Image (spheres, helix red, strand yellow):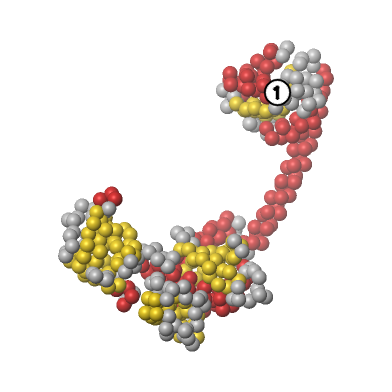
Amino acid sequence: MTVKKLWQEDVYTKEWDAVITEVSTVDNGNLKIYLDQTAFFPEGGGQSCDLGFMNDMKVIDVQEDGKEVVHTVSPEGAKLPKAGDKVHCTLDWDHRFDNMQRHCGEHILSGICYDLFGGVNRGFHMGHDAMTIDISLEEDPKITELTYDMVMEAELAANRVIWSNAPVTVMRFETRKGTENLPLRKALAFDEDISIVCVGSPENAADCVACCGTHPATAGQVGLIKIFRVEKNKGMFRIFFEAGERALEAVRTRHDILYKLSMRYSSTIEDFPVKLKAAEDKQNATKAKLVHVTNALIAKESAELDAKAEESAENVIVHKLEVLSMDDAFNMAKPYMGKTKKLLMLYSIVDTSFILVSSGKPACGKLVKEYASFYNGKGGGNDVSARAIFTNEEDAMLFADLISKHLK
């Protein structure tokens, strides 16, 4: 028995009664159920399947099985059905209409890309965060790329189709005969049981292409198309976008972010770029000043270290840095690496960490590896330099004292 596909007769069918023709058990106690008629759309054409209920049982997946439709159902404690039972089916309409808006939005944008740029849609994906279409520039040799400005032009044209509230019709054909005079943007890939979706009239179509999915009766119900970005992908151009309520939510989310950022800068959204540029310029000036001051401080500390090393008879020189970070200490230590006659231990009070520097003898990395763990320290390095990181100054100084005594 061939199932009656109610979504092909009326895409707005939300509730209906049906008779179960077959039931079988699958994994996790779920059931596979076949019906004599169904409005549950099976996954296909880039569109996810419908969801909903059969009586009190949740429909969690719908697939085509030849000319039949198989519904995967979770009984959830309900009385198990059998062939011949009558069930009342309810569609998750929010999920269905979301799919209809998005799928029809894809048709409109793909048709516009073909019309404006000769771009053929070679790939379509309805993702969770966005939809994508992969546009191959095949029809116009003068157009070799899609820029952001070009897709913004396409976005406006696509939304104008929506604002025109153009009719969306589905024409069904048993064979290719009857499709020859339609303005298809893609050649047919099959010879029978053909569904053609047309946005607008065939004489002035915004899009006309074979598709098995579900679509609203008018383009106006799509509501909005918003393109986010375009990027090169495998010799084509991938457009990231949304349609319908999801497009509105995406615009709201981005607007909220921009609004909150502009408020932080005591600015309107319109003036935010200017305010942000001024803040960045000020920040860059501060960074440049900080680099200058840091270099001056490193030079001062280096002079003090040189004097200390020259005056001291000890083999180990411990030099505390009150302001400089460990990275600053490392930059300060670079000129001494492999050259100093003594072991230098530069201690960053800020980071409770040492930079060890030597001529290679003693080997700095070996000292850290062998002794830092005695005081809950960690780190490593090579023969001429190493880092030793501690959780507190007391442990760091005990490590330095141990090294000083070891090399005395």
Q: Residue at x 49, y 79 (%)?
A: 184
The residue positioned farthest toward the bottom in the image shown: 203
Q: Which residue is mark 1?
A: 364
> Which image quadrant is residue 311 in?
top right
> How many other residues sit within 10 Å of disc 1, few (<14), some (14-19) or many (≥20)?
many
Q: Residue at x 46, y 63 (%)?
A: 126
Q: Nearer the viewer, residue 264 or 318?
A: 318
> Which image quadrant is residue 266 in?
bottom right
Type of amino acid under label 1: Cys
Judged left or right of residue 363, residue 113 is: left
Judged left or right of residue 385, residue 243 is: left
- Residue 59 at x, y percent in the picture: 29, 60
Q: Quadrant of the N terminus?
A: bottom left
Q: Residue at x 47, y 86 (%)?
A: 181
Q: What is the total number of numbered labels drawn onto the structure image?
A: 1
Q: Nearer the viewer, residue 84 or 109?
A: 84
Judged left or right of residue 359, residue 402 is: left
Q: Quadrant of the C terminus?
A: top right
- Residue 153 at x, y percent in the picture: 59, 74
Question: Where 64 falls versus 401 (above or below)?
Answer: below
Residue 41 in sight in this render: yes
Q: Residue at x 50, y 76 (%)?
A: 187
Residue 220 in sight in this render: no
> Which image quadrant is residue 10 in?
bottom left
- Residue 118 at x, y percent in the picture: 59, 76
Label 1: element kind: helix
Q: Nearer the viewer, residue 283 or 385?
A: 385
Q: Nearer the viewer, residue 255 or 403?
A: 403
- Residue 222 at x, y percent in the picture: 44, 73
Question: Where 40 falls versus 220 (above or below)?
Answer: above
Judged left or right of residue 396, residue 361 is: right
